[in-house]
Image (cartoon, grey):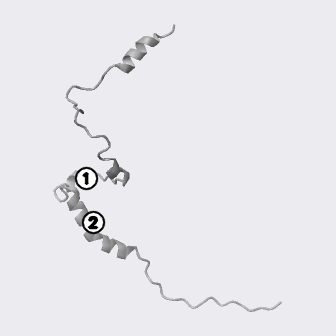
Amino acid sequence: MKKNSQHRNADANRDTMRPEYDFSKAVRGVTAARYAQGANVIVIDPEVLDVFPDSAAVNATLRALAPVLRQQRRPRHRAMRPPAHRSSAKA
């Protein structure tokens, strides 16, 4: 038995927008430039929200911690080993 395609189209075209959503004064693309620059979303654990109440607090802390982390990432200098001895056997 075929479904009534006219009934399907009526459901697809039905307005499902809630009345409390008012986009009459919306500006199209107002955040597009900022979004195009890229966004890094990080979820803060609820246990530390008292320390990091907003993005400014998170960024300030990360800026202070970044030099320490960069210093730890640098490869440590190893003691120089003498070069391996190559035999100079001539054939």
Q: Residue at 42% across / 16% down in the picture?
A: 9
Rendered image quadrant of residue 66? bottom left
Q: Is residue 77 left or right of residue 48?
A: right
As drawn, which residue projects farthest toward the top?
1
State the residue in front, 85 or 60: 60
As drawn, which residue projects farthest toward the left?
50
Q: Nearer the viewer, mark 2 or mark 1?
A: 2
Q: Which mark is residue 29?
A: none
Q: Which residue carries the number 2 mark?
A: 62
Q: Residue at 22% across / 36% down in the picture?
A: 25
Q: Which mark is residue 45?
A: 1
Q: Earlier in the sequence, mark 2 or mark 1?
A: 1
For badge 2, the amino acid type reads Leu
- Packing grade of label 1 (10 A; few <14, some 14-19, many >=20) is few
Q: Is residue 85 left or right of residue 23?
A: right
- Marks 2/1: CA–CA distance: 16 Å
State the residue in front, 48 or 13: 13
Secondary element at image label 1:
loop
For badge 1, the amino acid type reads Asp
Q: Residue at 23% across / 57% down in the picture?
A: 55
State the residue in front, 35 or 89: 35
- Which percent across, then down, holds residue 22? 22, 31
Rendered image quadrant of residue 12? top left
- Which percent across, then down, holds residue 58? 24, 60
